[in-house]
Structure formats: structure tokens, C-alpha cells
Amino acid sequence: MNLTFGQKTIDAYKLTDPVKVSTELLQDSMFNLESYISSEFARAFGVAEEQAFCTGTGTGQPTGIFTENGGEVGLTLTRGANITCDNIIELVHSLKSPYRRNAVFLMNDSTISMLRKLKDTNGAYLWQPSLQVGQPDRLLGYPLYTSPYVPIVKAATLPIAFGDFSNYWIADRMGRSVQRLNELFAGQGQIGFLATERVDAKVILSEGIKLLKMG
């Protein structure tokens, strides 16, 4: 056996979000407006990150899991075919057994609504709703998570990922910073706030995350 090592480069793409607030609003606010702005920065950055981690192009942003340079296609359906119980089983077993120990499903809510109707040959639903608070629902015994930024089921899309997501590396550089700009907009009677972070992410070992591809 001849082992070889490849190399992946993790970059640092900058994400920024500026906000301007009137001086009067800051002075007259009945609650901590700066704290609220910081929490909204966190929410907005979280949304942008989640979208990029799912479908980012890798150009000026992280490389998403559901892209050609993301996970590895484990199963391709024929054109016009619907996702069946057998397809889900095939996708699971397209992933090598060592990765299946920590594997989970990731898909869009619209895809989940389709899969919740699937039954095995005995008429039992594949879907296993969680009965414990804080625990995810399960599909074929594996935890299942959802994101609105995963592609939906339509021709040539990649709507389902199954794998060990520790093979998707996220690199945060120095965390998120919020800078208060007191002078820049003073002539307009405003105070600026600028949030910045640098982040990249990509699949390091593509065979550890398998994708289902529609025909």
C-alpha cells in the first residue's frame, strides 16, 4: 500500500456589516441599544455563515458542503425519479462504515416533509421523532438536522447530505469584532458600528460526507 498526503488550503474571507444610528437615538434609548446592535450583528453573521457553509462557491466565501467541491456524490437518481426508502438506504451504505459511527443527515425542511411520508416494507415510517428534549429526530436510526439553505429537491440538485461532519472544517480568524465609529458620521448626527470577522470553511475529506444527487 502506497499512502500519499494531499494538501488543502484554508483561507480567511472577510465578512463585514455596517450600521449607522442617530446620536439622539443612542442618547434617548430606554434600553441598551449597543448590546442590541451587537446581538443583531451575531444573528446576521450566523445567517450568512450558515448559507455559505451549505452552498458557498469558494470564491470570496467559504466552500459549501452541497457543491461540486464539497461532499462526494454517493448516489445519483435517474431523471424524474422520486426519493424512495431504498435510496436513503443506498445513500447510508455509500458512506464507509468508519464514518457512519458519527454520521448525521442534513437537509431542507421541504425535503424532510417528503421523507416523513416514507414507509418500509412493513408499513412502518422511517422517520423516528425524538421523544427527548434537545435530541434530534432520526432517520434510519441516524440524527437528522435541517437548514433552510440546503438545496431543495428538484432536477440536478444535491438535497441530502449524510456523513461525519467533523470532515468539514471551519476556520474562524480572531473571532468577531465590533468597532464604534464616533467621528466618521458625526457631521450627519450619526454613530457608526462596523462588525467584521474573517472565516473560511471547506470539506477536508470528501469521502466522509456523501450527497444524494437528483437526476
Image: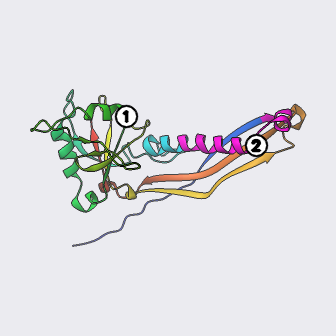
Residue drawn 40% across the image and 48% down it: 133
Question: Which quadrant: the N terminus?
Answer: bottom left
Residue 112 vertical position relative to residue 133 in the rendered view, above or below: above
Looking at the image, tell me whether mark 2 or mark 1 is earlier in sequence order: 2
Q: Residue furthest left?
A: 121
What type of secondary structure mainly makes up the magenta span? Answer: helix
Q: Amino acid at mark 1?
A: Asp
Local secondary structure at mark 1: helix
Badge 2 density bin: few <14, some 14–19, many ≥20, Cα 10 Å: few
Magenta run includes residue 126: no
Front in this rendered view, residue 99 or 58: 99
Residue 109's label in the rendered image is 1
Badge 1 density bin: few <14, some 14–19, many ≥20, Cα 10 Å: some
Question: Which quadrant: the C terminus?
Answer: top left
Residue drawn 72% across the image and 44% down it: 194
- Visual colour scheme: rainbow
The location of residue 209, given as percent across then percent down, is: 32, 52
**Label 2 – label 1 distance at C-alpha:** 35 Å
Q: Quadrant of residue 30?
A: top right
Answer yes or no: is residue 89 visible: yes
Q: Which residues are magenta?
A: 21-47
Residue drawn 66% across the image and 48% down it: 196
Q: Residue furthest bottom?
A: 1
Residue 32's label in the rendered image is 2
Q: Amino acid at mark 2?
A: Asn
